[in-house]
Structure formats: structure tokens, C-alpha cells
Image (cartoon, coloured by chain):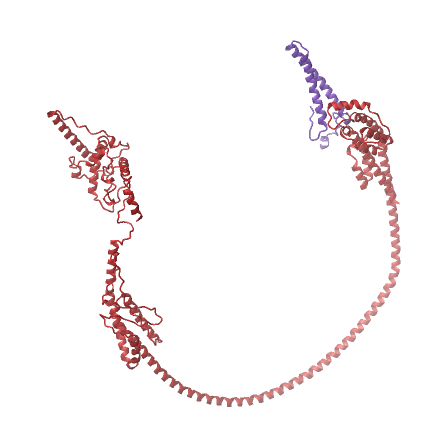
Chain colours: A red, B purple
Amino acid sequence: MLRASLRSPRVLGPKSVSNTAGLQWHSIQAARRGYAETAKPSIGNSKPVVLPGSASATSPQPPPPRQPMIQGAPTPTKPTTNPTIPAHNVPLTPPPPPTNNVVKPAPSATPPPPPPPPRKPRGRVRRFLTALVLLTALSFGGGVYYSRINDNFHDFFTEYIPFGEDAVLYFEEREFRKRFPPTTTRKPRDTGDRVKIPSQSGVSWRVAEDNKSATARHANASKDTPKPREAIQDPVGTKTEEKVKVVEAAKKEAAVPNSQSSETTLPLGKAPEGKSPVVQSPVKPGQPVKKETAPSSTTANAIPFTAPEVDQPSKFPPEVTRIDPIKVNDANEPVVQDLVKIINDIITVVNADNSNSRFSTTIDKAKREVSKLGGKIKALKDEAEKDATSKINSEKEDFDRAAKELIRRLEAEMAKQQSQWQEEYQNERQKIQENYEQKLKAEVERAQQVNEQRLKNELLKQAIDLKNKFMSDVKTQVEEERDSRLGKLTDLSKTVNDLEKLTTDWNSVVDANLKTQHLHVAVEAVRANLEKSQVPRPFVRELAALKEIASDDEVVNAAIASINPVAYQRGVPSSSHLIDRFRRVASEVRKASLLPEDAGVASHASSYILSKVLFKKKGLATGDDVESILTRTETFLEEGNLDEAAREMNGLKGWAKTLSKDWMGEVRRVLEVQQALDVIATEARLQSLRVE
Amino acid sequence: MPETSIPPPVAARPSKPVSEALLNEKWDRCLSSLLIRSSLGLSFGVVFSVLLFKRRAWPAFVGLGFGAGRAYEECNGSFLRTNRDGVRVTRP
């Protein structure tokens, strides 16, 4: 539908004419190029079938559609490219032209046909012209014919002779069409055209004519089908009727009320077959309420309802009479239920067939009979029940009597047995009592004996205990006596041991004393070595001896470890040596005493010169300047107070400190050694004191 | 023979000056460099004056000044550098 709507404006549009012309031209070009490239089927087929009429050189059909194209008209030359031709009219694909890879120049570019010669010279010229034209036509026709036979010539002809290809193609196409007559199922050649959809195709609001025919056929089929069904169902209906009849004969009198009841349920069941106006069945509970009306016009062959065409006036479909399934009042018996079910099935089948009007009477009868059958069965059941109750009552009385007699006999027997059992019981009791008394006596005697024995045993045990106690007492007494004497002896030995210990202690004291003496001596030796030497001398040997003597004294070891190794490897300078060096260092420090923080050459020089004119101080000068520090240090040194001197010099800063660094190091080493020696001497003294 | 491979205890390096002689050494260096550089500058100035400036006096003085100034600069640098931390001084 959409396509149809879109198509119409496209066709009617203003651009359509020029567009179509251009498209056609392109399609022609494309088609031509395609021919040149595709292989000719005659290559594979060694000898193509040549029909006598198509291949003749003197064919009465010249290629007329080519003429307008030569003149440069945009109209299509081939009928296949015409866009207005419907799809099924498009001719089939002709066999492709010969294989030549060279793209052939378009026929429009080929040289035009020979121009018409001048007509003025009448006689010879005219003859010559006619001869020429005839010859040309003949040779062209011969060429076309021969090109159908020979492939090489075909190639040559189509490539070099103007319009040769067209002519050959035309004939080939004719031959092809002859061999394969066109059919609508064939796919049209793809010419690059727009796909044309006929106006009939697609979805439209109209009901298609094909559909109409199909529905008609369908309606016919539905109409035909019921006939065999009737044939099948007829015997069934008769069977049910026969059954009903048999039952009726068997129980005639019982069926009367039931049949009446069934008749009341189906009042209009006896409606005439052909012209039953309306079969109105009473609406029953538990069933969907349906209004079933048989149309007045319905006959045995119900006319199937056909839906009206769209252009016809609409009408209601005729309503079909439905035979409603029966329902029996006293349908408690399973047999009746089965019957009812069977009949209901039949009814449903009939209803489904729409042939209810034909079977309605039969089925109504059947229904009635079935309902009668139910009543009969009920009556039979009642009678059987009555018989059974009477029988049961007589049986019950017999049983009662028998039971009473039985009970009486049983009671008498039971009383007899009871008296017997009581006697036996009394005898047994007496026997058991005697037995028990005897046993009791024996046990009491036994218990008394046991008790006496136990008492005796206890007495014996006590006697033994007493004896033991006495023995232990005696023993302890003896032991005590002995211990007092032995204790004195151990005291004596203890005192002897103490004495021994004392003597050994004294020995150790003497040893310690010796050790301390040695320590003293060693320390003195070191000190003497230090003080006596004018030149610094190593005192490693003395120190080693000292360490040997105080092998396990921690204090001494720590003191020795505190000495700088350089000190005892190279020796320490004496105090006079230190003072001497200090003089030198002091003069240098004085030169640099007036330097500022970042001193260059000029400040150094000025400091050097100005330090010459500084006044010298004496004694313990006060102040933080370099001069006073130096004076104080000198004084301390002269007093022999190395420690204070070192402290003073440590307060220097800047260049002064740098200059006095070596001297400070020496002083420090000396002080360390002195301190260590002092510590060792003190330790030695302490040791000697500790011994006392 | 591991005992022999142990070198004997090395004596104190004589090249390292004692701390009190640090300044003096610096002065020595400064003076010598001053002498050398000023004489070099002077000689260059003399040569230039002879070759290029028709024996005038000022090129010689200029050379002398250049040499002396260079020496002074170096000396000043050496004095300033000594006390500074974080700068390692490598001597030639």
C-alpha cells in the first residue's frame, strides 16, 4: 500500500521524463558493457542450434529499433529497457556476445553509415548506387549469418562492422526466445530499472478476488462433509433406540412416572422435522444460558452462511439450533450416568455438525427413554432393599437367642473354676509361709555367729596395735639419746670447717693484696714513664702489663678502653712540651684574632698588622675576646691546670679555633690518659681498702 | 704467611700541616702566586708593547695589573673558601 502511494507521485513528477531518459541511456551503456565482458554460451556449447528462419542472411526483419538511437535520440532502442513494460513482459536474457576484453566504443561513436551519394548523374550513377547498396546489404547479412556460425568471425564482425553487434544480438535473442519460450515465473533481467509493482499487488482495503474464491471453496467443503457423518451416525441413533425399547419392555410400569417427568422437561421434543418453527429448550441450571432458535427456513440441509462481500449489504449469520444435552433427575446410578454421557456426546457431535434439526426428534426420544430407564432402575433398587431388610431382621433374632444361651453356659463354668482355684491358692500359701519361717531361723543363727567372730577379731587387732606402739616408743627414746650425742660431734666438725674456710679466706686476702700491690706498681710505672720522658714515647707495654694484672677488673678495663689508641701508640707530650707548643699556637691565634666572619685577603692582612700593636694582658683577664682567653689559658697552663686551660681554649671561635685544633687534640689526649690513670690508681686503692 | 702481609704502622703524614701553620701556608701560597702572575703579566705586557704599541709603557703596567689582580682574586677565594661548610676543596 505504501509503495503504491509512493509510486504514483514519482511517475507523475516533473523530473520524471528527463530522469527516465538519462537512466535509460545509462542502462543501455551498462548493458552493452556487460555484454562485452560476459562469455558467450556458444563457447561452451560446441555447436549451437541454428534455426533456419532466424539465421538467414536475408531476414525480413531489419533492426529497426536501432535507428532512433543513431540519431542521438534519448529514447530507448531496446524494448527490454523500457521502464513502462511490466515485469512479466520483459524478455529473457539473451546469450551474451562474444568474449573480447577490449571495451568496445559505443555505437554512437562509430562512424556513420555511408552518406547518400549524389543523385544528379542519372544513369550510371544510379545503377552503381543500387549495386553498392545491394552489395553492402548482402555482405552485412552474410556477415551476420557467418558470425552465428564462426566464433572468430563473430568477434571480428561485432567489433569492426558498425551495427554488426546489434544485428547479431538481435538474431541471437530471437533464437533464444524460440528455444525458451517466455514464462511468468522467470526472473526478469536486471536492467537497472525501477522495480515496478502492479497496482493489484500489496495490501489494500479491498477483499481480494482470490480470497473470495477460496472462501467459496471452503464453504463448499464444509457443506459436503456432513453427509458421511450422517451415514455414520444413523446406526448409532438406531442402536440407542433399540436399547431404549428393550428396557421399556422389561420395566413398563416403573417407567411411567419417569417418562412423564422427561416429557415435562422436554415439552417441545416432538416438534415436526421439516418445519419446526422454534425449538425452545428450557434453560437448565449449571449450563451456559443459550438462546437457541432454529431459523424458520432451516431444512435438513442447512444452507451454510457465507460472509457477504464488502460491496454487498451486510447480514447476520443465521442462528443454528442447538440440541441441549439431557439431564436426568435421578442420575445417581453409574449406569444411567454412563448412558447420559453417551447421549450427551452424541448430542454434542450432532450440534457440531449443524444437523441438529434432523436428529432432534430421535434424540429427544432417546432422552426420554433414558430418563425412564433411570426411574426403572430406582424402583428395582427399592424392591431389593425391602427384601434384604426382612431377611436381616429374622437373622438377627436367631443370633440373639443363640448368644443368650452361650452366655449362660459360660457363666456356670466360670463359677466352678473360681472355687477350685481358691482352694489351690490357700494350700500354696500355707506351704510358702512354712518355708519362709524355717529360712528365717537359720539366718538369724548364722548372723549371731558372725557377730561373735567379728568381735573376737577386733580384740586381737587392738592387742597387736598396743604392742606395736610400745615398740615404737622404746625406739624413739633410744634414738633421742643417741642423737644428742651425735649432734655434739657434728658441731665440732662444723667449727673445724669454719676454721679451714677462714684460713683459705686469709689466703685470698693475701693474694688480693698482692694483686693490688702489683696494680699500684704498674700504674706508677705508667705514670713515671709519662712524666719522665722528654719526648713523647709509646707506653703500650706498660699498659699491656697493667691490663694483664687487672685481668678481670671491669673498672680498669673500662679506663684503659677510654684512652685513645693514638695516645698509647705514639705517646703523649709532657706538660712542658705542651706549654711550649701553646706559645707558638698563641702567637698564630693572635694574628688571626681580629678577623671578621668572612675574611678575605685584605682583612687577613689588616688583622695580621693590627695584631702587632695590640696590648698584651696578664693573669686571669676577664672578657670573651681572643686575647683575654689566650692570657687565661697561659696562666692556667703555668699553674699546671691542664683541664681548665683546655676548657678556655675550647671557647675560641672561627679561625682561632681552627688554628688551635691540633693543640687541643694533644691536650685532650693527655687529659684522657691522666684521667684513666687516676681512675686505675683509685681503683687499686679501693681494692686494697676492700680487703680489710 | 699472613703476618708478613700486614703492613707496618704508617707514620704520620708529614705533608699535612699542623693547624697553627694553616694561615702561614696560605700566605706563602698567595705571595708566590702573586709574584708569578704579576711577573707573567708584566712580561706579556712588555712583549705586547714591543710588538704592537711602539714600546709604550702602559701595556706593561696593564699586564702587571692583570697578573696581580688575578693572584689577589685567587688568594681571596682561598681565604674565603676555607671556613665554608659543604664545599670540598681540592688542592692541586
Q: Position of residue A419 (x, y in %)?
A: 56, 90
Residue A589 lies in quadrant: top right
Q: Is residue A221 above or below residue A137?
A: below
Residue A254 lies in quadrant: bottom left
Residue at the image point whose x is 27% and y is 49% from the top:
A201
Image position of A446 (left or right of A348): right
Image position of A387 (left or right of A525): left
Q: Is residue A346 visible from the viewing direction of this image?
A: no
Q: Nearer the viewer, residue A495 or A217?
A: A217
Could you tell me how many numbered marks the image carries?
0
Q: Position of residue A592 (x, y in %)?
A: 78, 26
Q: Position of residue A470 (x, y in %)?
A: 83, 70
In the picture as drawn, the residue positioned furthest to the left comes out as A123
Q: Is residue A367 above or below residue A532?
A: below
Q: Is residue A451 above or below residue A68?
A: below
In the picture as drawn, the residue positioned furthest to the front comes out as A14
Q: Nearer the viewer, residue A668 or A491?
A: A668
Q: Position of residue A371 (x, y in %)?
A: 31, 76
Q: Is residue A77 above or below residue A476?
A: above
Image position of B27 (left or right of A262): right
Residue A373 lies in quadrant: bottom left
Q: Is residue A590 visible from the viewing direction of this image?
A: yes
Location of the C terminus of chain A (image quadrant): top right
